[in-house]
Image (spheres, rainbow, N blue to C red):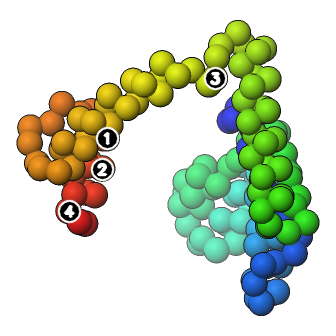
């Protein structure tokens, strides 16, 4: 089972493209529906068989189009994206993190973790400023190199 997902949408657009906004809303609701409903192998096979003449290929493709369903999600609907609603959203997530920390017995606002990140950031800054042998993990090294190339 995957992790729960929060979908956030605004009822009213903050731009003049009303049809585009409706498409975004439709896609948001469709993704929630897909996570909830899922798609069985039989449903996927019926779809692929309609376009594939080779039954073996249709079965192979159908395997990749199966979705388990039953995945939890929440939908947060903001009337409009404004400073007030964005602030309320940030407060909601901060409170959620606080409550999870209380339940799990951890400090989610741990300054020691922030301090450790600052130490790591100094080393990354040195590498961004001048290429040198890296002590970074491969993922961080990749992004240092990619960002350094752009500047």
Distance from the alpha carbon under mark 4 to that under mark 2: 10 Å
Q: Label 1 near label 2: C-beta < 8 Å? A: yes
Rendered location of residue 12, percent (x, y) = 87, 75
**Among the two numbered marks 3 and 2 on one chain, the one whose residue lies closer to the N terminus:** 3
* Residue, disc 1: 139
Residue 10 higher or lower than 40, as above or below: below
Along the line of sight, which residue is nearer the eye, 24 or 10?
10
Q: Secondary structure at mark 3?
A: loop
Nearer the observer: mark 1 or 4; the answer is 4
**Among the two numbered marks 4 and 3 on one chain, the one whose residue lies closer to the N terminus:** 3
Q: Quadrant of the C terminus?
A: bottom left
Label 1 crowding class (10 Å Cα cut-off): few <14, some 14-19, many 20+? few
**Among the two numbered marks 1 and 4 on one chain, the one whose residue lies closer to the N terminus:** 1
Label 3 crowding class (10 Å Cα cut-off): few <14, some 14-19, many 20+? some
Nearer the observer: mark 1 or 3; the answer is 3
Q: Viewed as shown, does residue 110 lie left or right of 120? A: right
Label 2 crowding class (10 Å Cα cut-off): few <14, some 14-19, many 20+? few
Rendered location of residue 111, percent (x, y) = 52, 22
Q: Secondary structure at mark 2?
A: helix
Residue 33 in sight here: no
Rendered location of residue 73, percent (x, y) = 81, 44
Along the line of sight, which residue is nearer the eye, 97 or 74?
97
Residue 108 has which mark? 3
């Amino acid at each position: 089972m995957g992790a729960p997902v929060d979908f956030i949408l605004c009822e009213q657009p903050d731009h003049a493209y009303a049809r585009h906004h409706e498409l975004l809303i439709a896609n948001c609701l469709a993704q929630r529906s897909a996570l909830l409903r899922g798609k069985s192998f039989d449903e996927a096979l019926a779809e692929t068989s309609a376009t594939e003449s080779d039954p073996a290929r249709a079965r192979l493709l159908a395997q990749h189009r199966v979705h388990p369903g039953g995945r939890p999600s929440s939908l947060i609907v903001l009337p409009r994206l404004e400073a007030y609603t964005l602030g309320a959203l940030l407060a909601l997530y901060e409170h959620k993190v606080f409550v999870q920390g209380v339940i799990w017995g951890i400090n989610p606002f741990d300054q020691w973790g922030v301090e450790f990140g600052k130490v790591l950031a100094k080393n990354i800054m040195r590498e961004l400023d001048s290429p040198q042998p890296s002590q970074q993990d491969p993922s961080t090294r990749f992004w240092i190199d990619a960002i350094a190339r752009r500047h």
